[in-house]
Amino acid sequence: MKKDGKIIAIVVIVTLIVVLALLSCIIFLQMTKKDDSKENKVSTLNETNTIKNEVVTPTDSDSEDIEIIPTMEDEVVADTAWCPTFQLVWNDMKNELVEQDVEFIDGDEPKYLENLNDELFTEEDISDEYYYKKWGVKSNKLKEEILKGVKDKFDEDSDIIDEGDNWGDGKDESAHVFYAMLKKVFEYEEPFDILDEGVFEHEGKWFENVKYFGIEENTNEKVKEQVTILYYEDNDNFAFSVATKDGDEVIFAKGVKGKTFAKIYEEIEKSADEYTGSEKMEEKDTLKIPNLKFNMLKEYKELEKKEIACKNGDEIIIEKALQTIKLEMDNKGGKIKSEAIIMTKETAMEEEEPPKKMNLDGEFVVFVKEEDKDLPYFALKVSDISKFQEGIEKLLIEE
Protein backbone atom coordinates (compact mmCIF):
# COMPACT_ATOMS: atom_id res chain seq x y z
CA MET A 1 0.00 0.00 0.00
CA LYS A 2 2.83 2.37 0.89
CA LYS A 3 4.43 1.61 -2.48
CA ASP A 4 1.17 2.32 -4.29
CA GLY A 5 0.86 5.64 -2.46
CA LYS A 6 4.31 6.68 -3.62
CA ILE A 7 3.45 5.84 -7.21
CA ILE A 8 0.26 7.89 -7.02
CA ALA A 9 2.13 10.85 -5.54
CA ILE A 10 4.75 10.68 -8.29
CA VAL A 11 2.03 10.59 -10.99
CA VAL A 12 0.29 13.63 -9.45
CA ILE A 13 3.56 15.57 -9.25
CA VAL A 14 4.50 14.74 -12.86
CA THR A 15 1.01 15.73 -14.03
CA LEU A 16 1.25 19.07 -12.24
CA ILE A 17 4.66 19.72 -13.77
CA VAL A 18 3.33 18.98 -17.27
CA VAL A 19 0.29 21.23 -16.76
CA LEU A 20 2.44 24.09 -15.44
CA ALA A 21 4.81 23.67 -18.38
CA LEU A 22 1.95 23.83 -20.88
CA LEU A 23 0.49 26.92 -19.21
CA SER A 24 3.90 28.62 -19.32
CA CYS A 25 4.23 27.88 -23.03
CA ILE A 26 0.77 29.27 -23.79
CA ILE A 27 1.44 32.49 -21.85
CA PHE A 28 4.82 32.90 -23.56
CA LEU A 29 3.35 32.40 -27.04
CA GLN A 30 0.56 34.93 -26.35
CA MET A 31 3.06 37.53 -25.15
CA THR A 32 5.29 36.89 -28.16
CA LYS A 33 2.36 37.23 -30.58
CA LYS A 34 1.32 40.52 -28.97
CA ASP A 35 4.88 41.89 -29.14
CA ASP A 36 5.24 40.82 -32.79
CA SER A 37 1.97 42.49 -33.68
CA LYS A 38 3.07 45.70 -32.03
CA GLU A 39 6.47 45.61 -33.71
CA ASN A 40 4.90 44.96 -37.12
CA LYS A 41 2.57 47.93 -36.71
CA VAL A 42 5.43 50.21 -35.74
CA SER A 43 7.63 49.07 -38.62
CA THR A 44 4.76 49.49 -41.08
CA LEU A 45 4.50 53.15 -40.15
CA ASN A 46 8.11 54.10 -39.61
CA GLU A 47 10.72 52.28 -37.57
CA THR A 48 12.18 55.59 -36.35
CA ASN A 49 8.87 57.09 -35.20
CA THR A 50 7.23 56.93 -31.80
CA ILE A 51 3.50 56.27 -32.02
CA LYS A 52 0.77 57.69 -29.83
CA ASN A 53 -2.68 56.23 -30.42
CA GLU A 54 -5.59 58.62 -30.61
CA VAL A 55 -8.85 56.97 -31.58
CA VAL A 56 -10.95 59.18 -33.87
CA THR A 57 -14.46 58.09 -34.78
CA PRO A 58 -15.56 60.05 -37.86
CA THR A 59 -19.07 61.49 -37.83
CA ASP A 60 -21.25 62.89 -40.59
CA SER A 61 -19.74 66.31 -39.96
CA ASP A 62 -16.30 65.10 -41.05
CA SER A 63 -17.45 65.12 -44.67
CA GLU A 64 -18.08 68.85 -44.46
CA ASP A 65 -14.38 69.38 -45.15
CA ILE A 66 -14.65 67.69 -48.56
CA GLU A 67 -14.61 70.48 -51.13
CA ILE A 68 -16.79 70.39 -54.27
CA ILE A 69 -15.52 72.37 -57.24
CA PRO A 70 -17.61 73.31 -60.32
CA THR A 71 -15.05 72.54 -63.08
CA MET A 72 -11.96 70.43 -63.62
CA GLU A 73 -9.94 73.62 -64.19
CA ASP A 74 -10.55 74.92 -60.66
CA GLU A 75 -7.90 74.57 -57.99
CA VAL A 76 -7.82 71.28 -56.13
CA VAL A 77 -7.17 71.24 -52.41
CA ALA A 78 -6.95 68.23 -50.10
CA ASP A 79 -10.11 66.10 -50.28
CA THR A 80 -11.85 67.55 -53.32
CA ALA A 81 -14.59 66.16 -55.57
CA TRP A 82 -15.95 67.17 -58.98
CA CYS A 83 -18.88 66.02 -61.12
CA PRO A 84 -20.23 67.77 -64.24
CA THR A 85 -23.84 68.23 -63.14
CA PHE A 86 -23.36 71.88 -62.13
CA GLN A 87 -21.61 72.62 -65.41
CA LEU A 88 -24.53 71.09 -67.33
CA VAL A 89 -27.14 73.28 -65.63
CA TRP A 90 -24.87 76.31 -66.00
CA ASN A 91 -24.60 75.66 -69.75
CA ASP A 92 -28.40 75.62 -70.06
CA MET A 93 -28.80 78.81 -68.06
CA LYS A 94 -26.09 80.57 -70.04
CA ASN A 95 -27.28 79.45 -73.48
CA GLU A 96 -31.05 79.38 -73.05
CA LEU A 97 -31.70 82.29 -70.71
CA VAL A 98 -28.73 84.67 -70.54
CA GLU A 99 -27.71 83.92 -74.16
CA GLN A 100 -24.16 85.14 -73.56
CA ASP A 101 -21.33 84.72 -71.07
CA VAL A 102 -22.58 85.19 -67.53
CA GLU A 103 -21.14 88.32 -65.94
CA PHE A 104 -22.08 89.98 -62.67
CA ILE A 105 -23.04 93.62 -63.04
CA ASP A 106 -21.10 94.60 -59.92
CA GLY A 107 -17.96 92.85 -61.22
CA ASP A 108 -17.49 90.85 -58.01
CA GLU A 109 -17.08 87.43 -59.61
CA PRO A 110 -15.59 84.20 -58.22
CA LYS A 111 -12.48 82.90 -59.97
CA TYR A 112 -14.30 79.87 -61.37
CA LEU A 113 -16.92 81.93 -63.25
CA GLU A 114 -14.72 82.14 -66.35
CA ASN A 115 -14.20 78.37 -66.32
CA LEU A 116 -17.96 77.79 -66.15
CA ASN A 117 -18.52 80.19 -69.07
CA ASP A 118 -15.93 78.26 -71.11
CA GLU A 119 -18.22 75.19 -70.98
CA LEU A 120 -15.34 72.81 -70.38
CA PHE A 121 -17.81 69.90 -70.13
CA THR A 122 -20.92 69.55 -72.31
CA GLU A 123 -23.50 66.92 -73.23
CA GLU A 124 -21.11 65.71 -75.94
CA ASP A 125 -18.70 64.51 -73.25
CA ILE A 126 -21.09 62.01 -71.66
CA SER A 127 -23.59 59.42 -72.86
CA ASP A 128 -27.29 60.17 -72.56
CA GLU A 129 -28.00 57.21 -70.28
CA TYR A 130 -25.73 58.64 -67.58
CA TYR A 131 -27.67 61.85 -66.91
CA TYR A 132 -31.06 63.56 -66.88
CA LYS A 133 -31.61 67.29 -67.19
CA LYS A 134 -34.53 69.64 -67.65
CA TRP A 135 -35.19 73.35 -67.44
CA GLY A 136 -38.18 75.64 -67.72
CA VAL A 137 -40.42 78.17 -66.01
CA LYS A 138 -40.51 77.52 -62.28
CA SER A 139 -43.75 75.73 -61.42
CA ASN A 140 -45.07 72.74 -59.50
CA LYS A 141 -45.76 71.12 -62.87
CA LEU A 142 -42.06 71.35 -63.80
CA LYS A 143 -41.13 69.97 -60.39
CA GLU A 144 -43.40 66.96 -60.89
CA GLU A 145 -41.93 66.38 -64.36
CA ILE A 146 -38.41 66.38 -62.94
CA LEU A 147 -39.31 63.99 -60.13
CA LYS A 148 -41.00 61.63 -62.60
CA GLY A 149 -38.07 61.93 -65.01
CA VAL A 150 -35.40 60.85 -62.52
CA LYS A 151 -37.66 58.13 -61.13
CA ASP A 152 -38.34 56.68 -64.57
CA LYS A 153 -34.73 56.89 -65.72
CA PHE A 154 -32.75 56.09 -62.58
CA ASP A 155 -35.33 54.88 -60.04
CA GLU A 156 -34.08 57.72 -57.84
CA ASP A 157 -35.58 60.53 -55.78
CA SER A 158 -34.13 64.03 -55.69
CA ASP A 159 -32.23 65.16 -52.60
CA ILE A 160 -32.29 68.88 -53.46
CA ILE A 161 -35.46 69.66 -55.37
CA ASP A 162 -37.29 70.77 -52.22
CA GLU A 163 -34.61 73.35 -51.43
CA GLY A 164 -35.82 76.91 -51.78
CA ASP A 165 -39.33 78.35 -51.70
CA ASN A 166 -42.58 77.16 -53.25
CA TRP A 167 -42.36 76.43 -56.98
CA GLY A 168 -45.66 78.21 -57.66
CA ASP A 169 -48.16 77.80 -60.47
CA GLY A 170 -45.93 79.02 -63.31
CA LYS A 171 -47.63 82.41 -63.69
CA ASP A 172 -44.33 84.18 -62.98
CA GLU A 173 -42.65 83.46 -66.31
CA SER A 174 -39.52 85.35 -65.24
CA ALA A 175 -38.60 82.61 -62.73
CA HIS A 176 -36.70 79.59 -64.11
CA VAL A 177 -35.24 76.33 -62.85
CA PHE A 178 -32.33 74.43 -64.39
CA TYR A 179 -31.86 70.88 -63.09
CA ALA A 180 -29.57 67.88 -63.75
CA MET A 181 -28.90 64.47 -62.21
CA LEU A 182 -26.07 62.05 -63.01
CA LYS A 183 -26.20 58.50 -61.77
CA LYS A 184 -23.94 55.59 -62.52
CA VAL A 185 -23.62 52.23 -60.81
CA PHE A 186 -20.59 50.29 -61.96
CA GLU A 187 -19.37 46.79 -61.15
CA TYR A 188 -15.86 45.51 -61.59
CA GLU A 189 -15.58 42.51 -63.87
CA GLU A 190 -14.44 40.49 -60.87
CA PRO A 191 -14.76 41.39 -57.17
CA PHE A 192 -11.46 42.27 -55.54
CA ASP A 193 -10.22 40.49 -52.43
CA ILE A 194 -11.19 42.08 -49.12
CA LEU A 195 -7.87 42.81 -47.43
CA ASP A 196 -6.84 43.20 -43.81
CA GLU A 197 -7.43 46.63 -42.32
CA GLY A 198 -4.35 48.83 -42.61
CA VAL A 199 -2.98 52.34 -42.25
CA PHE A 200 -3.29 55.47 -44.40
CA GLU A 201 -0.84 58.39 -44.35
CA HIS A 202 -1.05 62.01 -45.50
CA GLU A 203 1.45 64.73 -44.61
CA GLY A 204 2.60 63.00 -41.42
CA LYS A 205 -0.91 62.09 -40.25
CA TRP A 206 -1.55 58.39 -39.86
CA PHE A 207 -4.88 56.57 -39.68
CA GLU A 208 -5.39 52.93 -38.81
CA ASN A 209 -8.30 50.48 -39.08
CA VAL A 210 -8.69 51.58 -42.71
CA LYS A 211 -10.75 49.13 -44.77
CA TYR A 212 -9.00 48.03 -47.98
CA PHE A 213 -9.71 45.79 -50.95
CA GLY A 214 -7.32 44.78 -53.71
CA ILE A 215 -4.93 42.13 -54.94
CA GLU A 216 -2.46 39.91 -53.08
CA GLU A 217 0.09 37.49 -54.50
CA ASN A 218 -2.36 34.57 -54.29
CA THR A 219 -5.35 36.47 -55.74
CA ASN A 220 -7.23 34.79 -58.60
CA GLU A 221 -5.76 35.60 -62.02
CA LYS A 222 -9.12 36.81 -63.35
CA VAL A 223 -9.10 39.59 -60.77
CA LYS A 224 -5.59 40.62 -61.84
CA GLU A 225 -6.55 40.61 -65.52
CA GLN A 226 -9.09 43.44 -65.05
CA VAL A 227 -6.29 45.78 -63.93
CA THR A 228 -4.19 47.70 -66.45
CA ILE A 229 -1.02 49.40 -65.23
CA LEU A 230 -0.97 52.83 -66.89
CA TYR A 231 2.49 53.63 -65.57
CA TYR A 232 4.70 52.68 -62.65
CA GLU A 233 7.75 54.61 -61.45
CA ASP A 234 7.99 53.38 -57.88
CA ASN A 235 5.74 52.44 -54.96
CA ASP A 236 4.72 56.07 -54.45
CA ASN A 237 4.27 57.10 -58.10
CA PHE A 238 1.96 55.01 -60.27
CA ALA A 239 -1.43 54.79 -61.94
CA PHE A 240 -3.67 51.89 -62.91
CA SER A 241 -7.16 51.44 -64.31
CA VAL A 242 -9.81 48.86 -63.50
CA ALA A 243 -12.28 47.62 -66.10
CA THR A 244 -15.99 47.47 -65.32
CA LYS A 245 -18.74 45.27 -66.72
CA ASP A 246 -20.23 48.22 -68.65
CA GLY A 247 -16.94 49.15 -70.28
CA ASP A 248 -16.14 52.15 -68.07
CA GLU A 249 -12.70 52.56 -66.55
CA VAL A 250 -11.91 53.52 -62.96
CA ILE A 251 -8.49 55.19 -62.85
CA PHE A 252 -6.46 55.38 -59.64
CA ALA A 253 -3.22 57.32 -59.32
CA LYS A 254 -0.78 58.06 -56.51
CA GLY A 255 1.98 60.66 -56.41
CA VAL A 256 0.78 62.65 -59.45
CA LYS A 257 1.15 66.43 -59.15
CA GLY A 258 -1.15 69.16 -60.40
CA LYS A 259 -3.18 72.10 -59.11
CA THR A 260 -6.35 71.12 -61.00
CA PHE A 261 -8.06 67.85 -61.89
CA ALA A 262 -7.56 68.76 -65.56
CA LYS A 263 -3.80 69.06 -65.03
CA ILE A 264 -3.64 65.91 -62.91
CA TYR A 265 -5.54 63.96 -65.56
CA GLU A 266 -3.28 65.38 -68.27
CA GLU A 267 -0.19 64.27 -66.35
CA ILE A 268 -1.61 60.77 -65.94
CA GLU A 269 -2.24 60.52 -69.69
CA LYS A 270 1.24 61.86 -70.47
CA SER A 271 2.96 59.41 -68.12
CA ALA A 272 0.86 56.56 -69.50
CA ASP A 273 1.87 57.42 -73.07
CA GLU A 274 5.55 57.46 -72.07
CA TYR A 275 5.39 54.24 -70.04
CA THR A 276 7.16 51.28 -71.64
CA GLY A 277 6.84 48.73 -68.85
CA SER A 278 4.42 45.86 -68.48
CA GLU A 279 0.74 46.79 -68.32
CA LYS A 280 -0.20 43.50 -66.66
CA MET A 281 -0.11 42.54 -62.99
CA GLU A 282 2.77 40.14 -62.52
CA GLU A 283 2.78 37.16 -60.16
CA LYS A 284 4.11 39.02 -57.09
CA ASP A 285 2.52 42.42 -57.78
CA THR A 286 -0.01 43.67 -55.25
CA LEU A 287 -2.36 46.62 -54.91
CA LYS A 288 -4.81 47.89 -52.34
CA ILE A 289 -7.61 50.45 -52.52
CA PRO A 290 -9.49 51.92 -49.55
CA ASN A 291 -13.26 51.79 -49.38
CA LEU A 292 -14.75 55.22 -50.06
CA LYS A 293 -18.06 56.73 -49.01
CA PHE A 294 -19.28 60.31 -48.78
CA ASN A 295 -22.36 62.44 -49.42
CA MET A 296 -21.88 66.20 -49.87
CA LEU A 297 -24.10 69.21 -50.52
CA LYS A 298 -22.50 72.37 -51.91
CA GLU A 299 -24.23 75.74 -52.04
CA TYR A 300 -22.52 78.21 -54.36
CA LYS A 301 -23.39 81.22 -52.22
CA GLU A 302 -20.96 83.48 -54.10
CA LEU A 303 -23.20 83.07 -57.19
CA GLU A 304 -26.47 83.87 -55.44
CA LYS A 305 -28.19 87.27 -55.29
CA LYS A 306 -25.92 88.70 -58.00
CA GLU A 307 -27.38 90.73 -60.87
CA ILE A 308 -26.74 89.28 -64.33
CA ALA A 309 -27.42 91.08 -67.61
CA CYS A 310 -29.11 88.97 -70.30
CA LYS A 311 -28.60 89.56 -74.01
CA ASN A 312 -32.20 90.78 -74.43
CA GLY A 313 -31.70 93.48 -71.80
CA ASP A 314 -33.39 91.68 -68.90
CA GLU A 315 -31.61 91.41 -65.59
CA ILE A 316 -31.82 88.27 -63.47
CA ILE A 317 -30.41 86.95 -60.23
CA ILE A 318 -29.57 83.41 -59.18
CA GLU A 319 -31.75 82.61 -56.17
CA LYS A 320 -30.27 79.18 -55.47
CA ALA A 321 -27.23 77.34 -56.81
CA LEU A 322 -26.79 73.86 -55.33
CA GLN A 323 -24.91 70.66 -56.13
CA THR A 324 -24.69 67.28 -54.45
CA ILE A 325 -22.17 64.49 -54.96
CA LYS A 326 -22.52 61.05 -53.43
CA LEU A 327 -20.03 58.21 -53.82
CA GLU A 328 -19.86 54.65 -52.51
CA MET A 329 -17.00 52.37 -53.55
CA ASP A 330 -16.00 48.90 -52.34
CA ASN A 331 -14.45 45.68 -53.65
CA LYS A 332 -17.36 44.99 -56.02
CA GLY A 333 -17.68 48.41 -57.65
CA GLY A 334 -19.26 51.75 -56.91
CA LYS A 335 -22.17 54.15 -57.20
CA ILE A 336 -21.99 57.82 -58.19
CA LYS A 337 -24.98 60.12 -57.84
CA SER A 338 -24.88 63.87 -58.35
CA GLU A 339 -27.52 66.56 -58.68
CA ALA A 340 -27.38 70.26 -59.50
CA ILE A 341 -30.02 72.95 -59.55
CA ILE A 342 -30.01 76.65 -60.40
CA MET A 343 -33.08 78.78 -59.66
CA THR A 344 -33.28 82.22 -61.23
CA LYS A 345 -35.70 85.11 -61.28
CA GLU A 346 -35.90 88.42 -63.06
CA THR A 347 -34.89 91.42 -60.97
CA ALA A 348 -36.81 94.63 -60.58
CA MET A 349 -33.70 96.48 -61.66
CA GLU A 350 -31.91 95.46 -58.37
CA GLU A 351 -28.66 93.55 -57.67
CA GLU A 352 12.35 43.29 -64.25
CA GLU A 353 11.51 45.10 -61.78
CA PRO A 354 10.86 44.59 -58.12
CA PRO A 355 7.24 43.67 -57.31
CA LYS A 356 4.99 46.66 -57.70
CA LYS A 357 3.10 47.69 -54.58
CA MET A 358 0.32 49.92 -55.83
CA ASN A 359 -1.20 50.63 -52.46
CA LEU A 360 -3.49 53.62 -52.20
CA ASP A 361 -2.52 54.12 -48.57
CA GLY A 362 -1.68 57.79 -48.97
CA GLU A 363 -3.16 60.75 -50.82
CA PHE A 364 -4.58 59.68 -54.20
CA VAL A 365 -7.06 60.65 -56.91
CA VAL A 366 -9.87 58.78 -58.67
CA PHE A 367 -11.34 59.40 -62.12
CA VAL A 368 -14.25 57.50 -63.68
CA LYS A 369 -14.75 57.73 -67.45
CA GLU A 370 -16.41 56.03 -70.35
CA GLU A 371 -14.09 53.95 -72.52
CA ASP A 372 -14.67 55.95 -75.70
CA LYS A 373 -14.85 59.44 -74.14
CA ASP A 374 -11.95 61.85 -73.67
CA LEU A 375 -13.11 63.33 -70.37
CA PRO A 376 -14.05 61.59 -67.12
CA TYR A 377 -17.46 62.12 -65.56
CA PHE A 378 -16.25 61.92 -61.94
CA ALA A 379 -13.13 62.99 -60.08
CA LEU A 380 -12.11 62.71 -56.45
CA LYS A 381 -8.99 63.54 -54.43
CA VAL A 382 -8.61 61.70 -51.13
CA SER A 383 -6.21 63.00 -48.51
CA ASP A 384 -7.85 62.45 -45.10
CA ILE A 385 -9.27 58.92 -45.21
CA SER A 386 -11.25 59.42 -41.99
CA LYS A 387 -13.70 61.55 -43.98
CA PHE A 388 -14.55 58.57 -46.18
CA GLN A 389 -14.71 55.71 -43.66
CA GLU A 390 -16.17 55.31 -40.21
CA GLY A 391 -14.37 53.86 -37.19
CA ILE A 392 -10.84 54.86 -38.20
CA GLU A 393 -8.18 55.38 -35.53
CA LYS A 394 -5.98 58.41 -36.03
CA LEU A 395 -2.32 57.96 -35.05
CA LEU A 396 -0.22 60.88 -33.90
CA ILE A 397 3.42 60.54 -34.94
CA GLU A 398 6.35 62.13 -33.15
CA GLU A 399 9.18 62.65 -35.61
Image (cartoon, helix red, strand yellow):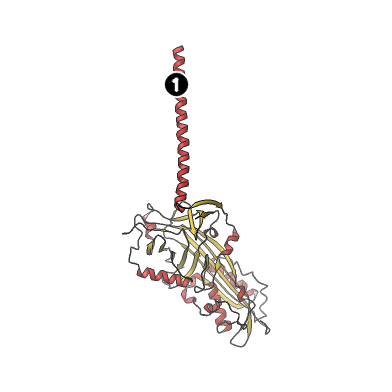
Residue positioned 67% across, 76% down in the render: 169
User: How many discs appear?
Assistant: 1
Q: Residue at x 46, y 42 (%)?
A: 33
Q: Position of residue 250 (x, y in %)?
A: 44, 64
Q: Identify the residue at horizontal 40%, vertical 53% (top origin).
A: 216
Residue 9 screen position, x and y as percent: 47, 19
Residue lying furthest bottom: 313
Is disc 1 surrounded by few (<14), some (14 to 19) or many (20+) residues within 10 Å? few
Kind of residue at badge 1: Val
Residue farthest to the left, as pictured: 352
Residue 277 picture quarter: bottom left
From the viewer's side, name the closer residue of 337 and 199. 199
**Where is mark 1, residue-wise?**
11
Compared with 96, 190 (above or below) is above
**Disc 1 secondary structure class:** helix
Q: Residue at x 49, y 68 (%)?
A: 378
- Residue 98 place in picture, x, y as percent: 58, 83
The one nearer the camera, 206 or 392, is 206
Q: Is residue 235 above or below residue 72?
A: above
Q: Where does residue 171 sit, x and y in percent of width and height?
A: 67, 80
Left or right of 209, for residue 281: left
